[in-house]
Image (cartoon, rainbow, N blue to C red):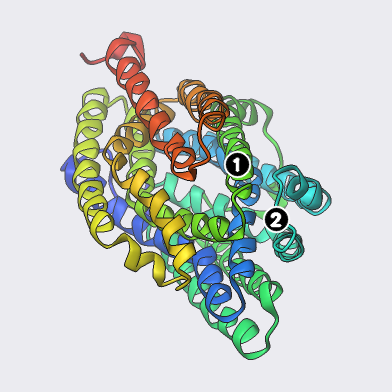
Amino acid sequence: MDRSRQSTDLIYGSIAKSIFWFSIPLLIGNLFQQLYNTVDAYVVGNFVSKQALAAVGASSPIINMLIGFFMGLATGAGVVIAQYYGANDHKKLHQAVHSSAALTLVMAIFLTIVGLFMTNPLLHMIGIPADVFPESSTYLRIYFGGITFALIYNMGAGILRAIGDSRRPLYFLVAACLTNIVLDLLFVRVFHMGVAGAAIATDISQALSALLVCMVLIKNGEVYALHIKKIRFHLPILKRIIAIGLPTALQQSIVSLSNVVVQSYVNAFGSDVVAGYSVTIRIDGFVNLPLQSFNMAITTFVGQNIGAKQYDRVKRGSKIALWMTFAVIAVMALFLFFFGRQVISIFNSDPAVIEAGWKMLFAFTTFYIVLPIVQIYNGVLRGAGKSSVPMYIMVFNFVILRQIYLAIITQFTNDVSFVFFGWPVTWITAAIMFIIYYHKVQWLPIEKASS
């Protein structure tokens, strides 16, 4: 197969360099992806009100719950495409790309309908404070009105990353994010449109990124090119995408649903705590960017090398990615431990908001060091096609165990700090399970496995 000049060779050459250079555009891209909602939070938090800040923050778990399901399916598509690309199977690669496009269109219709009609019931379910509810509802309805653009971009970017191109998705995301920043300030600060302006800015920006990624896929002339008239489901390929992607989709949406329930515990402490929580969730999102980037990189790395039957390289790459991630997260955790309050104050200067946010950030920074184990082993197993294993581990720990912890701990204390420790407690238990599975269970193809 003729490798695209935009691609990074993950099958040959230095493992550390391959993972590092492939992950850098992913990291920068994830940074700009995170800036979408963060800019919304910053602008409304500084130029509207702390209730508006809480409204944008309270919307995130619901958005993540529905988007997460699609992203899981997109991950399955990416693994399948990466394996066919590594195996030089042109025909199945072509079918996988067009099946993925068809799946995106179906899911876009489904999630638009669900998002628009379920907004208020979901907000009622998690007990959004009365002074935050109207703006949360407005933000979510407008966001879901344009969710199709987000899905198209993410699937298109996933196709490009699967063949080793992590740069062009970055360029499109940077353009969209800069557009979002300009429009946020224009709609909110100049036109005084409040949270509605922030949501509209996000929709327009996502439409731009969707348009750019479609243009590349349609016009690139490569074997993975997208032909509009050929978009349809190829059932054997679709079954494989779903077999790999559905466990991840269920994991993403169920874990996000759990976070919606966790949000209901936080909401009980009032709008100051909700605002502090909203800020810290965004800071946490930035901390997770390098972890997510290495996770995505190792998933593609493993997928391509398994397709090429480079099994020794798979395990070496897993170790290298793990140590890279440990080094990065240690630096970030130390920085936030000492300067966390100052970072929170960027979003809102209210002392009550800062104090609530710091309680959550303190709980997180103390235990961030275990997250690389969860993220890297998760990515490795997904790249190997074992996506059901991360699903079971993460759903058990981040949903079942976390809800049990919260249900028990809130019976004995009214201190919100103990609610926030529900996250790191379950990070630790999940990390232990991933370590046991990775080292004790055969997850590579048995006939070719390397010890």
- Look at the image and tell me whether residue 13 can be seen: no
The residue where tag 1 is placed is: 265
Judge from the rendering whether residue 162 lies leftward or rightward of residue 253; answer left or right: left
Residue drawn at 47 percent across, 53 percent down: 281
Q: Residues within 10 Å of mark 2 (few under 14, many from 20)?
A: many
Q: Amino acid at mark 1?
A: Tyr
Residue sitting at 27 percent across and 16 percent down?
439
The secondary structure type at the circle numbered 1 is helix
Q: Is residue 345 left or right of residue 202?
A: left
Residue at 62%, 90% in the rendered image: 190
Q: Earlier in the sequence, mark 2 or mark 1?
A: 2
Vertical placement of residue 90 versus 178, above or below: above
Q: Classify 36 as above or below 317.
A: below
- Most extreme residue toward the right, as rendered? 117
Q: Which residue is mark 2?
A: 129
Q: Using the image, determine if residue 314 lies above or below residue 135.
A: above
